[in-house]
Image (tube, rainbow, N blue to C red):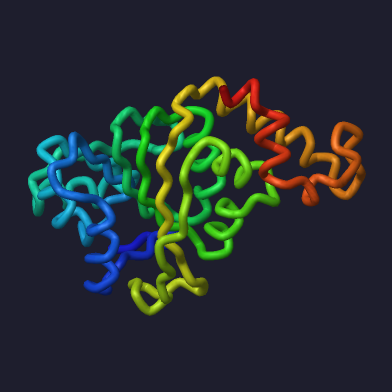
C-alpha cells in the first residue's frame, strides 16, 4: 500500500510508535496528525483528544483510515493548508521537510509540534549555524527527542530519522517572518564578513542574534 512516488515509508516498530505517542499527554484540547498513512500512530493518538483531525495526501489511505478508525480525516496537500490546531504531529515524506518547517515559521498558527525528519535535516534545524535553525532557537523551544533506525519502517529508507519537538513561544507570525527573512539575507553573504558584525555568518553567536534582533523579538 506504499506509494514510492509519494515518498511513503510506514512506521512498524511498536516501541517507537509508543515513544512518539507518549510525547503528547492525554486530554489534549486538540490534535492534528499530518500524514496518517496506515494509522500506526493514529489508532493511539485518537484516544488523546476528542478533537482529532487527520490530514492525508493519498486518497487511498484517506478512505482506509476513515473505514478502519472512523476518524475525521481530510484529503489535502499540507503545503497548501494553514494549520490552526494547537497540537500537531507529523510523519511527512522527507522531500517536503524544508518547505514544511518554513511554513511552521511563516504560516502555521499551531503551538506544539512533534515531527519526524531525516536525521541530518533534524540536526540542521536544531543547530544555530543556519537561518532556519536560528529562527527556531529565537522563537521556540526545539529539541531532538530520539533517533529512529531505518529498520523501524516498511519499506526501510536509506537514512536514519529523528523525532523532534517544537514549542513555539513567539506566536506573532509576522515577527517570525521578519526574523527569518533578515537571517536569510545575512546567510546569503556566505563566507564573506558581514559589516554589522565584523565576522562571518556562521561565527555569530545566538546571544548576538538575540541582541541584534531584540526589537523584532519583543
Look at the image and tell me whether residue 6 can be seen: no
Q: Relative to the observer, which residue lies in front, 103 or 28?
A: 28
Q: Percent from the top left, x then y, of residue 78?
A: 40, 38
Query: What residue is shown at x 77% (from left), y 33% (from top)?
Result: 185
Lateral position of residue 191 relative to residue 37, left or right: right
- Quadrant location, the N terminus: bottom left
Q: Is residue 66 above or below residue 173?
A: below
Numbered-mark total: 0
Query: What residue is shown at x 22% (from left), y 61% (from top)?
Result: 40
Query: What residue is shown at x 67% (from left), y 44% (from top)?
Result: 206
Q: Is residue 125 above or below residue 148?
A: above
- Quadrant location, the C terminus: top right
Residue at the bottom extreme, as displayed: 151
Query: What residue is shown at x 43% (from left), y 69% (from top)?
Result: 147
Q: Relative to the observer, which residue lies in front, 203 or 55?
A: 203
Q: Percent from the top left, x then y, of residue 213?
A: 68, 28
Lateral position of residue 165 relative to residue 138, left or right: left
Residue 198, image quadrant: top right
Q: Percent from the top left, x then y, of residue 172?
A: 48, 22
Q: Percent from the top left, x then y, of residue 20?
A: 29, 60
Look at the image and tell me whether residue 9 can be seen: yes
Amino acid at each position: 500500500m506504499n506509494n514510492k512516488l509519494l515518498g511513503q515509508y510506514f512506521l512498524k516498530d511498536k516501541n517507537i510508535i509508543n515513544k512518539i505517542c507518549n510525547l503528547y499527554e492525554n486530554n489534549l484540547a486538540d490534535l492534528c496528525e499530518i500524514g496518517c498513512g496506515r494509522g500506526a500512530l493514529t489508532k493511539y493518538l485518537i484516544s488523546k483528544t476528542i478533537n482529532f483531525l487527520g490530514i492525508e495526501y493519498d486518497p487511498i489511505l484517506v478512505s482506509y483510515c476513515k473505514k478502519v478508525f472512523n476518524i475525521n480525516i481530510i484529503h489535502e496537500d499540507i503545503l497548501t493548508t494553514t494549520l490552526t490546531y494547537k497540537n500537531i504531529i507529523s510523519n511527512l515524506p522527507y522531500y517536503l521537510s524544508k518547505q514544511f518547517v518554513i511554513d511552521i515559521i511563516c504560516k502555521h498558527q499551531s503551538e506544539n509540534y512533534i515531527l519526524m525528519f531525516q536525521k541530518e535535516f533534524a540536526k540542521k534545524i536544531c543547530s544555530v549555524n543556519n537561518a532556519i535553525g536560528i529562527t527556531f532557537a529565537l522563537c521556540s523551544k526545539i529539541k531532538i527527542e530520539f533517533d529512529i533506525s531505518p529498520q523501524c519502517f516498511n519499506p526501510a529508507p536509506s537514512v536514519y530519522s529523528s523525532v523532534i519537538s517544537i514549542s513555539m513561544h513567539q506566536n506573532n507570525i509576522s515577527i517570525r517572518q521578519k526574523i527569518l527573512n533578515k537571517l536569510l539575507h545575512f546567510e546569503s553573504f556566505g563566507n564573506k564578513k558581514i559589516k554589522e558584525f565584523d565576522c562571518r555568518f556562521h561565527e555569530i553567536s545566538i546571544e548576538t542574534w538575540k541582541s541584534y534582533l531584540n526589537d523584532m523579538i519583543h
